[in-house]
Amino acid sequence: MNFKHIWIVFKKEMKDAFRDKKSVLSNIFLPLILIPLIYYGMNFFIKSASKEVEENMKISINTNESIEEAKKFTKENIIGEDNIEIVYNSYSDAKEALKNGDINCIITYEDGFFEKIKNGTMSKISLEYNSFKNASQMGVEILRSKIMILNQKLATQKLTELNVSPEILNLVSISDYDISIEETNDGATRNDMLIMIVPMYLVIVIVTAGIPIAIDVLAGERERNTFEALLSTKANRLSILIGKYMAILVFSIIAIIMSFLGLLLGIVLNPEMFSTAGQEMSITAIFSTMNMSVGAFLLALLSSITLAVAFAGIQIGISTWAKTVKEAQTYLSYMMFPAMILGFATMFMGVGDMKSFMAFIPIFNTIASLKMVLSGVVNYGFLITGVIVNIIFVVIITYFIIQMFKREKTIIR
């Protein structure tokens, strides 16, 4: 192994990587644009849908009694001051409009509803909506909450008429306390959206970031008939391997950093998506929830780096095995699936749901480590075990790659 030769090979591969404008654009600059745009689009459509329902909600009333009485009751007791329009007097027309998405919901009052209300007996309201229409689902949730308020209001009025304190409806007072706050660093609160998205996203990027350059450094070079010429130079195979390995790893780290910056930019531009109840909608408030332990952060970072090294090795191994660029692209494209499967499988898992055995599984252990750090929970045993397992993973993969490079049939195909 010659460090001068390693450096020459490394520089050559990095120059080739940055000459490929498509690769640089898609892996380094595109995340800075695409990720903020994705968050902006999600935030825009969610806010637009909510605003559309709030400002243009339309409902219809179905009753066998006086429609005017039903409208008056609905306006006074359910709609209130909200901008909800009552349309269609015909139930058949309303049903057709609901199917077409022209109205949000249909309120049906049972026979004798208003008389039962006056007498203080059980009365029934039915809500019809169209689950194929997002506006209809949002509309029915609004009506449900309003009818619950109406229910409490009517019960309170009836109890008052009977000289009974309305407090009888709330004989049990409920308070809750999240004991997980005691386990976090300095009792800091958490941002659940960040804990859910960031680990999954970063691990997928770590596993796949080096694929473009990995395809080119071996399968691409073999297809261009330049690999044999490189083998005939003074550089031995180990120096060539390490130089190419380092190029893939450095390119991966650059792509990971740029993707993370894109994620941060998305948060800065759309902080509402990452704001929790009662929390100020600003980037400062969002990141103040992450009160990280320095030791835990460094271990999680080391876990991420060792995972990146391991998958850079897997990528170079697959590229070495593949005969053509197309074959390498096919094989390497499958690498995204384990990262996505494990990422989505743990997306909705909390820190308390992470089991001890996960520390012994690469990808799992990195996701769990990142979740712990973002949650402010410190479990040094888990974090250290995860790092050790990833290092062993790197050693095993590196050993197999070295063995592959020693075989003529593998590298000259």
Image (tube, rainbow, N blue to C red):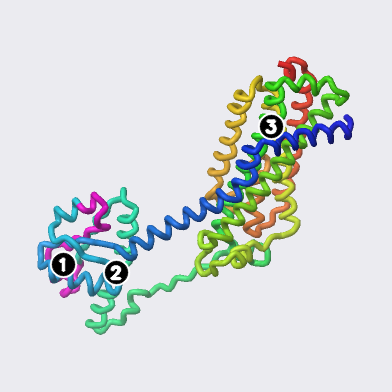
Q: In this view, does 241 lie to the left or right of 83?
A: right
Identify the residue position indicated by label 1 in the image: 113
Q: Look at mark 3 in the image and give the residue it sits on.
A: 214
- Residue 355 lies, in percent from the top left, at 61, 46
Q: Which amino acid does label 2 sit on?
A: Asn
Residue 358 in sight in this render: no
Residue 1 x/y as whole percent: 88, 29
Q: What crowding class fits label 1: few (fewer than 14 Cα within 10 Å), some (14-19), or many (20 or more)?
A: many
Q: In this view, does 270 lie to the left or right of 169?
A: right
The answer to whether residue 349 of the structure is visible from this angle is yes
| Residue 136: quadrant of the picture | bottom left
The residue that mark 2 highlights is 83
- Region of the chain picked out in magenta, as a range: 97-122
Residue drawn at (14%, 71%), measured in percent from left and top?
A: 69
Name the one closer to the observer, 361 or 320. 320
Q: Is residue 186 magenta?
A: no
Q: Is residue 1 above or below residue 32?
A: above
Q: Which of 165 and 366 is in front in this view?
A: 366
Q: Is 378 placed left or right of 166 in the picture? A: right
Horizontally, residue 349 falls left or right of residue 127, namely right
Q: Residue at x 51, y 59 (%)?
A: 273
Residue 83 versus residue 231 in the image, above or below: below
Tell me where residue 149 sits by quadrant.
Answer: bottom left
Q: Name the residue at 59% across, 46% down.
A: 30
Callout 1, which amino acid?
Answer: Phe
The residues tagged by marks 3 and 1 sit, at their Cα atoms, a distance apart of: 71 Å
Tell which circle, 3 or 1, labels the residue nearer the N-terminal end. Answer: 1
Q: Residues within 10 Å of mark 2 (few under 14, many from 20)?
A: few
